[in-house]
Image (cartoon, rainbow, N blue to C red):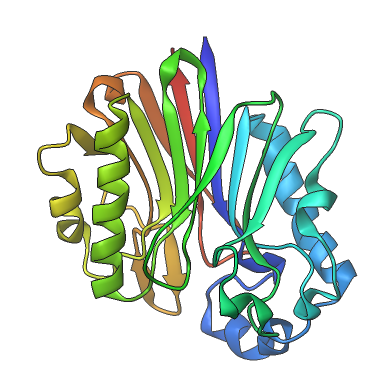
Amino acid sequence: MAFKVLFSNIGYARGIDGTLWQHICRINRNFYCTIPLQQQVLMQLKGIIASIRPDICCFVEIDEGSVHSARFNQIKYLLDDEYRHYDIADKYGPGNWLNRLPLHFGKSSAFMSRVDYPFDKLYFTTGSKRLIHRIALPNGVMLYFTHFSLQKKVRRRQFAELRKLIDDQGVPVIVMADFNIMHGFAELQPFLDGAGLVILNDEQQPTFRLHRTTKALDLCICSRSLADKMDLKIIQQPFSDHEALLLEAEW
């Protein structure tokens, strides 16, 4: 049985691809982006989804309806008859004061799927971005997806928290995230050591671009017992400064 998971940082559908020219010329979209512009970006994303037909689509940097997006709920626009099951939640956690700030309200993570998979929402105890989605996949595999902190010290604590969640559960896992590891894969070694986890990405294949800087930030990590059954592809996203990940598994 083939199973596909898409992980995508869509950059709030602002249509900024990471080049210096677009960051300068489209900077106004970070403060206010019209609904037609967002729909134009999301239609490109829909085209990618239609071409690869994943079972689950996981999104970070998606907008649930902030003042910057003209109150436009982006996940609702992506849903259709094939992908009708979903969850969206702010990435800061319930009761977090950041949710009340205009610059942060509505900034979310979300997923949509063809089948109604069991899931829950967990939260880091540190950092501003705290949401972790945990989804139960077929064959007893657990999928975690999240968006780690930009601050190295906070990331280190978040890695330790996620590692404990994985160790406590004791089942095969897949972790897909924007890891924000600005210092390379060596930063993940404490997370991987002794856990039987492997990185499926090639460190030399970037997933993020900012002007002339490119880095592998969007990663897929899985249990070693699953690695031989997994194939990871990088999917170009011309509307974002991040590329998407497509994980194909053979259960």
Regarding residue 204, the answer to whether it shows in the image is no
Residue 12 relative to residue 168: left or right: right
Residue 233 relative to residue 173: left or right: right
Residue 168 relative to residue 114: left or right: left
From the viewer's perspective, is residue 244 above or below residue 53?
below
Residue occupying image coordinates x 37% and y 25%: 230
Name, please, the residue furthest toward the top: 1
From the viewer's perspective, is residue 240 above or below residue 200?
below
Residue 184 relative to residue 92: left or right: left
Residue occupying image coordinates x 72% and y 89%: 28
Quadrant in which residue 50 is drawn: top right
Name, please, the residue furthest toward the right: 36
Tell me where residue 137 appears, x and y as whole percent: 51, 23
Which image quadrant: the C terminus?
top left
Residue occupying image coordinates x 44% and y 41%: 144
Tell me where residue 213 appears, x and y as whole percent: 36, 75
Regarding residue 130, the answer to whether it shows in the image is yes
Tell me where residue 59 appears, x and y as whole percent: 60, 51
From the viewer's perspective, is residue 212 above or below residue 224?
below
Q: How many marks?
A: 0
Quadrant in which residue 46 is drawn: top right
Name, please, the residue furthest toward the front: 95
Tell me where residue 131 appears, x and y as whole percent: 51, 57
From the viewer's perspective, is residue 80 above or below residue 244?
above
Quadrant in which residue 187 is drawn: bottom left
Residue occupying image coordinates x 44% and y 21%: 249
Closest to the observer: 214 or 127? Answer: 127
